[in-house]
Amino acid sequence: MTKKTPADLSWLPPHHEWDFRSITAEECRLACYWEYQREFGCDYDPKKPWLAQTGAERAAVQAAFSPPPIVQVRTFREFMNRTPVAARPDPAAWRRYTDGVYVIRPNFTAGVEGVIKTLAAWARKESKHFKRAPRAKAAAPPFHLLRWLAAWRLDQSAKKAGLKYQRISESLQAYQNQNRRQAYGDVFPGSYGSQGAWSKACRDAKQTGQKIIRDPLALLHGFYYTGQR
């Protein structure tokens, strides 16, 4: 009986470029933003892969992006100073960043109770213009974006090596068998079962990349940039 030749894994990129199984739900959205900027971004281009950073480095990035607080008050000057420069040239990105931002000048010399009463009345009126987010349904971590990006990067590497989908699939199966680890989301690209599904994932990754070129903040819904890094 002829012994099966081991799959050639030498063409695979470094694992931190595409094996995103160790990325947790808590860091998934920021990791997507980081890696898509590395692949397709122009104005902001983090060089070091998310998974190649130390825990302290990743924590520093996470500290720079936070979910928006219930109430945030800043001077207009502070707001403009913290605005990502990459967002300013693009009108759509600028609208996304500034939507829902207000400049408030309270007259505390008239008494704090009067200011509170006036702000409360304004908030009740203004809130009618916004849809209330459903409490029971939180946005799912976008692990699928990482799976698309992994397929895209592997496909680019495979093309350079002159490999077709069948060889890619065999290599990924062999790699997975040799590198078992916990996955926090469905990010391993070996889950695509056909050439068509693989090609679609690559197209989806490219389209997402083009979207973030037009709007650098598109992957950060539910976060705002504090600039404290």
Image (spheres, grey):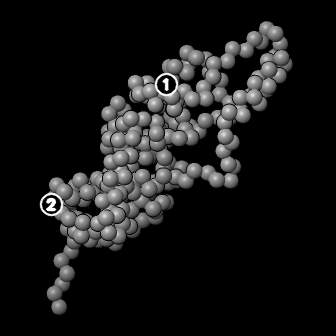
**Residue 199, image x, y percentages:** 30, 59
As drawn, the label of residue 155 is: none
Residue plotted at (56% across, 19% down): 78
Please say if 229 is above or below 187.
above
Residue plotted at (23% across, 53% down): 156
Quarter of the image where one finds residue 109: top right
Please say if 175 is above or below 204.
below
| Residue annotated with mark 2 | 162
| Residue annotated with mark 1 | 83
Sequence-wise, which precedes: disc 1 or disc 2? 1
Question: Does residue 228 appear in this view?
Answer: no
* 57 sits left or right of 206 in the view: right
Number of residue marks: 2
Element on which disc 2 rests: loop
Element on which disc 1 rests: loop
Residue plotted at (50% across, 40% down): 220
* 16 sits left or right of 221 in the view: left
Q: CA distance from mark 1 to mark 2?
A: 44 Å
Q: Which image quarter is the N terminus in?
A: bottom left
Residue plotted at (39% across, 41% down): 211
Q: Residue furthest front?
A: 129
Quarter of the image where one finds residue 18: bottom left
